[in-house]
Image (cartoon, helix red, strand yellow):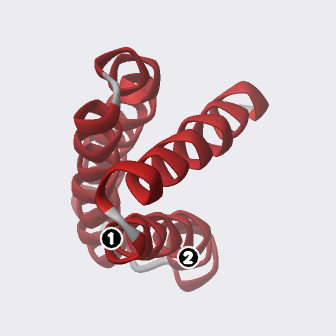
Amino acid sequence: MTLLYADIAVVATLTIADAWERRGKKAAQADIAALAGNLLLNAGWSGVFFRSGRRGLATAWAGVLAASSADLVRRARRESPTRGLALAPYAAWTGFATVLTGGIARLNRERK
């Protein structure tokens, strides 16, 4: 998982720097806001899933995280197709995590 976070950090940093140079401060700020929102969603998912035990909410949260991750890939791709490709595994992982969380939620409903 550490490589995935390193990938996010490197690609996001380069994407934000390029956005600033090519499209200006507001474009870079929009990318920074998108990254910050994604990282907050990422950090919050664990609390929702593990601490609250609310698996349905955790599934929805993971879905929003997956959409946010896909948006980061789109933003990176806009600046550099290669960087978009490099960040794609993060979006794939969060999509898989959404499906997995949903499966766990469904199994827990069936047990009750």
Amino acid on which disc 1 is placed: Trp
Label 2 and label 1: CA atoms lie apart by 8 Å
User: Residue lying farthest right?
Assistant: 2
Q: Residues within 10 Å of mark 2 (few under 14, many from 20)?
A: some
* The one of 71 and 82 positioned closer to us in this rendering: 82
Residue found at x 35% / y 17%: 85
Secondary structure beneath label 1:
helix
Residue under circle 2? Answer: 44
Amino acid on which disc 2 is placed: Gly
Secondary structure beneath label 2:
helix
Q: Position of residue 4 (x, y in %)?
A: 63, 31
Q: Is residue 90 above or below residue 68?
A: above
Q: Quadrant of residue 29?
A: bottom left
Q: Position of residue 74 (x, y in %)?
A: 22, 41
Residue found at x 63% / y 31%: 7
Q: Quadrant of residue 28?
A: bottom left
Residue under circle 1? Answer: 61
Q: Residues within 10 Å of mark 1 (few under 14, many from 20)?
A: many
Mark 2 near mark 1, Cβ–Cβ under 8 Å? Answer: yes
Q: Is residue 33 above or below residue 46?
A: below
Residue found at x 61% / y 69%: 43
Q: Position of residue 25 (x, y in %)?
A: 42, 73
Q: Is residue 83 above or below residue 111?
A: above
Q: Quadrant of residue 82?
A: top left
Residue found at x 34% / y 73%: 30
**Which of pointers 2 and 1 lies earlier in the amino acid sequence?**
2
On screen, residue 92 versus residue 17, left or right, reads: left
Say the numbered circle drawn on residue 32. Answer: none
Quarter holding the N terminus? Answer: top right
On screen, residue 1 versus residue 99, left or right, reads: right
